[in-house]
Amino acid sequence: MPRLVDHAERREAIISAAWRLIAARGIDGINMRDLAAEAGYSNGALSHYFSGKDEILQSAFEHVLVATNNRIAASSHGLRGLRALRKVCLEIMPSTEEARLEARIAISLWQRALTDRQMESVNNTAVREWRALMARHIDEAVADGEANACDAAVQANALMNMMIGLQVSAVLDRGATTRKSQLAMLDAAIDSFTTDHT
Amino acid sequence: MPRLVDHAERREAIISAAWRLIAARGIDGINMRDLAAEAGYSNGALSHYFSGKDEILQSAFEHVLVATNNRIAASSHGLRGLRALRKVCLEIMPSTEEARLEARIAISLWQRALTDRQMESVNNTAVREWRALMARHIDEAVADGEANACDAAVQANALMNMMIGLQVSAVLDRGATTRKSQLAMLDAAIDSFTTDHT
């Protein structure tokens, strides 16, 4: 009897093999045949797992979200306050080559999300979770006396929007968005919370 | 003798009539016939002014940039320091219905810019100018004693990236990105520069 999970597992294996190709060439620049070849499937077998390119793009975005959340969980484990906040932001920021590829997937998805409510929803769910996580760590920093009293929801929203903007800039405007300049922006943002302002 | 400027003028008139349609339905959701009808031209006449949809999208983006820069010039005229910085950001932020439509054009263009160097360049030129303008006003604020000493280039880059993120959020994640919440984020960002921190 075939296992029921096979279908979901195989979809994930295909995306895991193919998302870099989608990122590098853009969803408009590849066809199902290219993706099938990258994943080691025949064209016909691929269409058994994905109805079309929109479904593949959304799955690639979800794959990127899972990877990011795994990095966040690993790097912020056991931390709280501003140290945890910094780790969360570092994992969302596109400061490595891998994360720049992930940002390309996000930019493709946002354009499709202009007219696709399901893609919009996938994006917003991730953003909402990250914003809540940032707000929690800002609240911890205030409670611990690390940060000035502030409206953590507003500050987390502002920081999250900077993270979203960096996805665009790190891909299109690399010269102004090197790893070094991203770290300087993050440090400035985190410093603005701290109580040692003069 | 036909005037040499006619061609450019007519292109601008067409885009001026049609950019809201591009924003509302997405560049992928319309064809040349829809655009021609919106601008009051025949399909054949439209193709005399634009080679295709990519050129139309880029022209719509440039139209939005000109509109934004005109608003910036009008609202920040005669101001300097943090007051000028606030005006610049207010005009870039997508806090009105008109500006939300403009943000949709930007999101469409960024996706095409992933694989089109000219679109990338149009975007980066605008971002570079705005970032420099923001840095100048931050430097003024420091010189006038309004703001703490800081690296104005880093702060302007961070603020510019928040503005870019807001273009995405105001369109896809409206509930978290109302006009009121955008103003709260801007106030928090401007406040972080001021010298009256406790």
Image (cartoon, coloured by chain):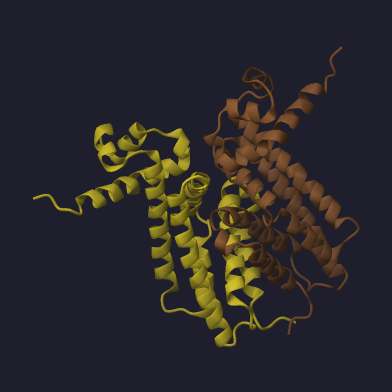
Chain colours: A brown, B yellow
Nearest to the observer: residue B125 or residue B87 = B125
- Residue drawn at x 66%, y 46% is A102
Would residue B101 be found to the left or right of residue B162 on screen?
left
Nearest to the observer: residue A166 or residue B191 = A166
Is residue A43 shown above or below B109? Answer: above
Is residue B35 shown above or below A140? Answer: above
Q: Position of residue B117 (x, y in %)?
A: 46, 50
Is residue B42 shown above or below B147? Answer: above
Would residue B175 be found to the left or right of residue B69 on screen?
right
- Residue drawn at x 25%, y 48% is B10
- Residue drawn at x 58%, y 73% is B153
Q: Quadrant of residue B165?
A: bottom right
Would residue A55 be found to the left or right of residue B94 on screen?
right
Is residue A137 shown above or below B113? Answer: below
Q: Position of residue B24 (x, y in %)?
A: 46, 41
Point out the image quarter for the C terminus of chain A. bottom right
For residue A13, say whether it is visible: yes
Q: Residue furthest top?
A: A1
Nearest to the observer: residue A72 or residue B141 = A72
For residue B83, say whether it is visible: no
State the count of labels: 0
Q: Quadrant of residue B180?
A: bottom right
Point out the image quarter for the N terminus of chain A. top right
Nearest to the observer: residue A29 or residue A103 = A29
Q: Position of residue A55 (x, y in %)?
A: 64, 30
Q: Position of residue A16 (x, y in %)?
A: 73, 35
Q: Residue furthest right?
A: A78
